[in-house]
Image: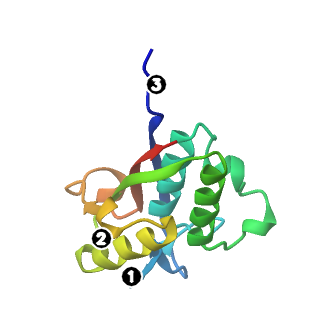
Amino acid sequence: MAMIPDFRVGNGFDVHKFAENRELWLCGVKVPHDMGLLGHSDADVALHALCDALLGAASMRDIGFHFPDTDPAYKGADSRVLLRRVVELIAAEGFSIGNVDVTIIAQKPKLLPYIPEMISTVAQDLGIDAGRVSVKATTTERLGFTGRGEGIAAMATALIAR
């Protein structure tokens, strides 16, 4: 019987609401905006979704399991550090990253000017070529909580292999 390659796909989803007196971080990039996202860490909703996609693909639970918001060690944590730790965790299980795809769902701010830097930053943290990283932004046409400007959601998909 032929050996089946161990390719795995995972998806992640996260949501954070807007809050005053917070910086807005998306895919490791500081985005100028009058509000940031509320969370125990820096609340980078896009990187949190990506962490969950990678962990899910490796059958290693989720970001809350590995970095609980009840642990003061993660108060104000840089989500790029968490992402790099996730890469280490899945690498320890023999996985490498094929590609990732992140979608940020926000009515505002407009994110198009920041996408190239987001791709570069994510690729650097994952240790892969930028050509294997996709970051996109979309709106919900003013529908739902993101459309009303109450927060931001993000989805991510990751392909890993062992």
The vertical placement of 59 against 33, above or below, is: above
- Residue at 72%, 70% (x, y): give it: 75
- Residue at 54%, 54% (x, y): give it: 51
Q: Can you name the residue that lies furthest to the front here? A: 1
Left or right of 104, for residue 95: right
The earlier-in-sequence mark between 1 and 2 is 1
Numbered tag placed on residue 108 in the rendering: 2
Camera-nearest residue between 101 and 145: 101
Q: x, y percentage for residue 116?
A: 29, 76
The earlier-in-sequence mark between 3 and 2 is 3
Question: What is the count of numbered marks?
Answer: 3
Q: Are marks 1 and 2 in contact (CB under 8 Å)?
A: yes
Q: Amino acid at mark 2?
A: Lys
**Numbered disc in front, either 3 or 1:** 3
**Numbered disc in front, either 3 or 2:** 3
- Residue at 23%, 57% (x, y): give it: 142
Which residue was labeled with disc 3? 3
The earlier-in-sequence mark between 3 and 1 is 3
Q: Residues within 10 Å of mark 2 (few under 14, many from 20)?
A: some
Left or right of 81, for residue 34: left
Camera-nearest residue between 8 and 34: 8
Which residue was labeled with disc 1? 33
Q: Residues within 10 Å of mark 1 (few under 14, many from 20)?
A: few
Identify the image quadrant of the N terminus.
top left
The vertical placement of 28 against 134, above or below, is: below
The vertical placement of 24 against 137, above or below, is: below
Question: How far apart in space, not on screen, are marks 3 and 2 (Cα)?
Answer: 48 Å
Q: x, y percentage for residue 130?
A: 34, 69
